[in-house]
Amino acid sequence: MCELPPNIVEGNVFVRLRPLAVVVLLPVLAILTGACEGGNLAKDSSRYASQTTTVKVAHVPSTLFAPLYVAQDKGYFKDRGLDVELRKVQAGQEAVPLAGSGKVDAVVAGFSAGLFNGLAQGLNVKVVASMGSATGAKPSPTALEVAQRLLKSKAVRTTSDLRGRKIAVAGGSGAAGGYQLAATLREAGLTLKDVKVVNVPIPDMATALADGGVDAALAPAPFTTAMEQRGTAKPLAVPPRGTSATGVIFSGGFAGKPAADRFLAALRDAAGELQGSRATSEENLKILAKATGQKLEVLRRTPSYQWDPRLAVDENQLAAQRQTYLDSGLLRDGAAERG
């Protein structure tokens, strides 16, 4: 078993995050990954029978992170000698410090302004993989939902009509949803500064839309489907294809270890089973329903995200996300100066 050098990010493209700088390394380093995990040996559970490793993973329950749940349910982690303990958290912002202090080995959640600020201050974590991204198609799993009352009164007809209005985003502007909203608004020539972003937990968005607390909400699947079915809101716009603000973060102490390599290999196996129509197979939907607590009938009506088969880090999306936070004044002075 070999170990990857520190700071190496696995995937088709290798990325190292220095404080607010994304550095692309030569693809030839992919040879290291192939040498560590390959073929049937990687899936031979007997190979790891005497060396099971516990991996503590903090996650925000969401269909965005389907590879995590499929790998867990179908035994891909176990096959590689990993005992993965999933710990639910409300938001990625609260989980990243846990990884930085070594209290968890990995975080599967959204990236935030706090992550970039933390990296600038030397937070010992590494971005190692991507997760779900937008398809850009309609219907979309993540959508900018507008209150039905505003659509009926024709007070809002297009995305540009949301200028100055309140839009709910879980975690606020600095969360992963803030970047997704910015990418969606950009299509209409708006920025985050042109609207009033309100921090509303995802489960409370439907109520906030119905009682007038907010005018619109950037919501993920399957909450979008649920509020549409209740007649609370309708989608007005969706994030552009490829928009991604979520992924896998390793603690500095876990990254580079053989178990970390095996963890990513299991996730990639699961991602391979989520390509095309297989993402919405009855078997996988049942896994997601159990993992996220969502009703199976809602998931059946919910469009799927898309996943890179290798879960490679998208350095362009990371750079765009950081720039969005910088433009919105969400990065600390030290962080901005190092960009």
Image: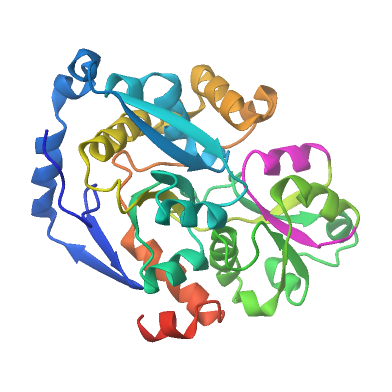
**Exactly how many numbered labels are in the figure?**
0
- Viewed as shown, does residue 169 lie left or right of 228? left
* Location of residue 74 in the rendering, given as x and y in whole percent from the top left corner: 41, 19
Choose top left, top right, bottom left or bottom right for residue 75.
top left
Q: Is residue 214 magenta?
A: yes
**Is residue 73 positioned above or below 272 on the image?**
above
Q: Please give the name of the residue rendered at 27% of the width and 24% of the height, measured from the top-left corner.
A: 80
- Viewed as shown, does residue 218 lie left or right of 56? right
Q: Please give the name of the residue rendered at 40% of the width and 73% of the height, measured from the top-left corner.
A: 121
* Colour scheme of the picture: rainbow
Question: Viewer-proximal residue, 253 or 108?
Answer: 253
Choose top left, top right, bottom left or bottom right for residue 25.
bottom left
**Is residue 18 positioned above or below 168 on the image?**
below
Q: Which quadrant: the C terminus? A: bottom left
**Which residues are the magenta region?**
212-230
- Viewed as shown, does residue 256 lie left or right of 54? left
* Location of residue 194 in the rendering, given as x and y in whole percent from the top left corner: 68, 79
Q: Please give the name of the residue rendered at 86% of the width and 63% of the height, measured from the top-left corner.
A: 154
Q: Which quadrant: the N terminus? A: top left
Question: Viewer-proximal residue, 277 or 250?
Answer: 250
- Viewed as shown, does residue 129 lie left or right of 225? left
Q: Residue furthest top?
A: 46
**Is residue 207 positioned above or below 167 on the image?**
above
Question: Viewer-proximal residue, 145 or 161?
Answer: 145
* Location of residue 287 in the rendering, given as x and y in whole percent from the top left corner: 53, 22
From where the camera sits, is residue 317 visible?
yes
Q: Is residue 134 magenta?
A: no
